[in-house]
């Protein structure tokens, strides 16, 4: 979470609009799942493939940069 905030802050200081979406891997089916809410990391996520819930212990993120 700290690293993600530092990335957001770095781009924001440069005047660039960014969105960050956290991702996790479903422990049941192995699908890579992205949370729908930007800049939000939840403790648990529901898989869009199998519908089961996973406790999120590790996460990555996708950074969307809005170019002018």
Image: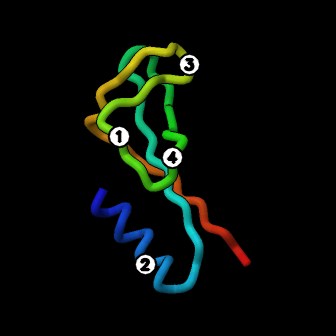
Read off the residue under disc 2: 10
Q: Residue 42 shows which numbered tag?
A: 1
Image vertical order of residue 33 relative to residue 8, above or below: above
Mark 2, Cα crowd under 10 Å, few <14 / some 14-19 / many 20+, is few
For the residues carrying marks 3 and 1, which lies nearer the camera in this image? Answer: 1
Q: Earlier in the sequence, mark 3 or mark 1?
A: 1
Residue occupying the point 50% across, 33% down: 33
Label 3: how many Cα within 10 Å (few below 14, some 14–19, many 20+): few
Q: Disc 3 designates what residue? A: 49
Q: Nearer the viewer, mark 2 or mark 4?
A: 4
The picture quadrant where one finds residue 64 is bottom right
Gap between marks 2 and 4 measured at Cα:
20 Å
Q: Is residue 57 left or right of residue 62?
A: left
Precedes in sequence: disc 4 or disc 3? 4
Q: CA distance from mark 2 to mark 1?
A: 23 Å
> Where in the figure is residue 16, as x and y percent of width and height?
58, 78
CB-based contact (under 8 Å), mark 3 and mark 1: no
Up the image or down, 32 lies above or below 13; here it is above
Label 1 crowd bin: few (<14), some (14–19), many (20+), radius 10 Å: few
What residue did someone put label 4 on? 37
Q: CA distance from mark 1 to mark 4?
A: 10 Å
Q: Which element type, helix, strand or loop, lies under badge 1? A: loop
Sequence order check: which comes first, mark 2 or mark 4? 2
Residue found at x 26% / y 36%: 57
């Amino acid at each position: 979470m700290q690293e993600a905030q530092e990335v957001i802050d770095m781009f924001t200081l440069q005047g660039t609009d960014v969105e960050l979406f956290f991702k996790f891997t479903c422990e049941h089916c192995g699908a890579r799942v992205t949370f729908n809410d930007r800049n939000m990391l939840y403790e648990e996520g529901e898989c869009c493939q199998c519908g089961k819930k996973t406790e999120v212990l590790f996460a990555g993120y996708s950074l969307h940069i809005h170019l002018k």
